[in-house]
């Protein structure tokens, strides 16, 4: 089964360490670059704005918005590059705690029927002020 290298790049925001911070209501923009390592009988390539929890206990995940970037099969070695933009909601804010963390990200995935979907993602901080982002 062929796979793909998928990179998600975010534009704008404020850089804090190695991650970008965006405020609630901001627009996060970026690009997805997908390069299949073999011919893929894919349905579509999508970008998703989502948050997920990490840590102890149950794992939660919520997709806030999904954008279809392209539909149809993909050829081996051919780069597929698409732009996206999402308006961020007011909450939940990013949080890095001892037992649980809330992680925001833009994830790109190639929908493969009856197969494992190749994915790539880029995390970011959702926080109203940079001082609130120091918990990251």
Image (tube, helix red, strand yellow):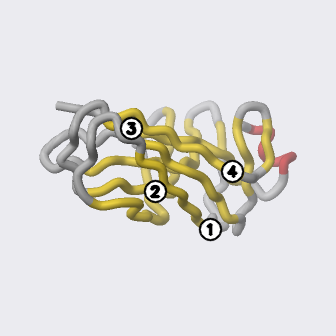
Q: Nearer the viewer, mark 1 or mark 4?
A: 4
> Where in the figure is residue 48, as x and y percent of width and height?
45, 56
Residue identified by numbered label 4: 11
* Element carrying mark 2: strand
The structure residue drawn at horizontal position 29% and vertical position 57%, both measured from the top left corner, is 44
The span from disc 2 to disc 3 (Cα, nearest Å) is: 18 Å
Is 128 left or right of 73, judged from the image as shown? right
Q: Nearer the viewer, mark 3 or mark 4?
A: 3
Q: Quadrant of the C terminus?
A: top right
Residue identified by numbered label 2: 48
Is 77 left or right of 48, judged from the image as shown? left
The structure residue drawn at horizontal position 75% and vertical position 38%, both measured from the top left corner, is 135
> Where in the figure is residue 79, as x and y percent of width and height?
41, 42
Is 73 left or right of 106, judged from the image as shown? left
* Element carrying mark 3: strand
Q: Earlier in the sequence, mark 2 or mark 3?
A: 3
The span from disc 3 to disc 1 (Cα, nearest Å) is: 27 Å
The structure residue drawn at horizontal position 75% and vertical position 59%, both measured from the top left corner, is 23
Q: Which mark is residue 35?
A: 3
Pointers 3 and 4 in contact (C-beta within 8 Å): no
């Amino acid at each position: 089964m062929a796979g793909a290298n998928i990179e998600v790049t975010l534009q704008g925001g404020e850089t804090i360490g190695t991650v970008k911070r965006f405020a609630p209501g901001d627009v996060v923009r970026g690009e997805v670059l997908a390069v299949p390592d073999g011919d893929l009988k894919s349905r579509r390539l999508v970008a998703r704005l989502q948050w997920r929890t990490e840590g102890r206990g149950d794992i939660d995940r919520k997709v806030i918005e999904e954008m279809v970037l392209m539909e149809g099969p993909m050829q081996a070695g051919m780069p597929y590059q698409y732009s996206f933009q999402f308006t961020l909601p007011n909450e939940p804010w990013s949080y890095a705690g001892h037992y649980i963390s809330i992680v925001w990200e833009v994830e790109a995935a190639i929908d493969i029927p009856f197969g494992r979907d190749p994915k790539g993602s880029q995390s970011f901080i959702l926080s109203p002020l940079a001082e609130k982002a120091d918990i990251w």
